[in-house]
Amino acid sequence: MSVAVEKPNRRQPMLKKVRGFIRWVLSKTFVRKILHVLDMAGGVAIRTRVGAHIVGTLIPGSRPVLCSDCFSDHGLALDAARIGILNTLPCPNCGAQNSKKLTLYLLEVLASQFFVRGSVIRARYGSAPFVQFNKQHYRKNSFDALPSLRRDAELIGEKARFGFFEYGPRLWMIGYVTPLEELQDPQRRDPVIKRILKEYPQRTWSATHTLYRLRANPSTPSNPGEYDSPPDQFLGQGRLDSLELPIMYCSQDIEGCVHECRVTVEDELYLAALKPVRELRLLDLTELLAEEHVTEFESLDMAVHMLFYAAEHSYPISRAIAVAARDSGFDGLIYPSYFSQVRSEEMPFETVYGISVRRFPKAAQYAQSGVFPNVALFGRPLHDGIVGVTCINRLILRKERYDIGFGPVKPLPGNWNRPWR
Ligand SMILES: [Zn+2]
């Protein structure tokens, strides 16, 4: 999210000290507990007329500025109802009593989720939002919204004192990353793959690790052989398998298996629990590489991260990495699940001031938390006796839940090149 850059002034050293002191106080566990209790008490109080007035007087920031009834765009109103809170104070804009209320803070959350997160468009590699907002564009909205949204965008901007604009992404965000460009060119691919094998860490997994393998519609579910890599005639369809190298796709996480298998309610599903028979040597591509003095444009970390979040056009590259890893003596890969993009709530390729959050040492853990690992074992590990089936169960999909948000419509035609649905 873009934020106005503060001008330096003489008060800044003092301000810095005050902010440092506040941060120190807030870092104390008992202070955080007291604030949490006060926050909960405030949350209950604002549901009563008197409580809402008292809290609103003591903490002006808790007063609503807009509400979910203020908007004419349907998706924006639904997002506002999801993000907004109950507060018995009437909406100062439309006067509604029973709608979900938005404080200044929540208004910024709504703008960020609807306009920025909601405008993210996938490129061949990477993705970027086409709308951003900041204080510098206050009263200078330049985003060409549909008529249903135009007035709402102006209303939000006026209350929060920022403006929306069409965002031209930094080129690395849409895949202009040198190692990734080299990987796409078969003539220049090999040296980058050599670096991947050398720079990513190795993991050794023993029999204490459990892996899961999901099968849809196996002919004999009780037969452990059904859970091995697919027969030859089905090879070359997935991210890592090829005629040259069968792959057993599995995961330490059952939900991950369900996502990867792209199952429907019509499928008969069976899950095998597996254990390594001997130590497995795996190349871990989910690790965030610490690269010093390297920008996103030259980052191997960003190249690999984008590769596993790309669709089928990227498969020849990931298959070449798998073959090279097998040739170097690895038993398999740990790699980021493509579905990490919908399983975590984080924005794909999130940036702060146009810099990837993966580049900030302290944010690395946060970036890593949005990655769900999968495991690919090379060859036919059950047939070869590298892993063994310890248990087979039927798997029932009891409930599927979608977490839905909305976004604006891009005014120009997109060149999606995807099937009509
Ligand atoms: Zn309202």
Image (cartoon, rainbow, N blue to C red):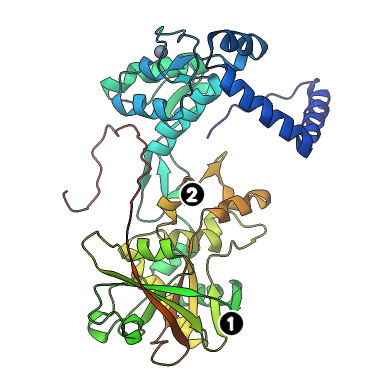
Q: What residue type is labelled 2?
A: Phe
Picture residue at 66% right of the left edge, 57% below the top: 293
| Left or right: where 300 falls relative to 34 | left
Circle 2 or circle 1, nearest the eye: 1
Label 2, on which residue?
Answer: 349
* Residues at marks 2 and 1, CA–CA distance in whole angstroms: 33 Å
| Residue 238 seen in this snapshot | yes
Q: Is mark 2 on a helix, strand or loop?
A: loop
- Residue 171 screen position, x and y as percent: 45, 48
Q: Mark 1 Cα within 10 Å, few/some/many (few <14, many 20+)?
A: some
Picture residue at 55% right of the left edge, 62% below the top: 301
Q: Residue furthest bottom?
A: 384
Q: In terms of image quarters, where does ligand 1 lie? A: top left
| Left or right: where 103 falls relative to 79 | right
Q: What residue type is labelled 1?
A: Ser
- Residue 190 screen position, x and y as percent: 46, 77
Give the quarter of the image for residue 207. Answer: bottom right
| Mark 2 and mark 1 residues within 8 Å of each other at the beta carbon | no
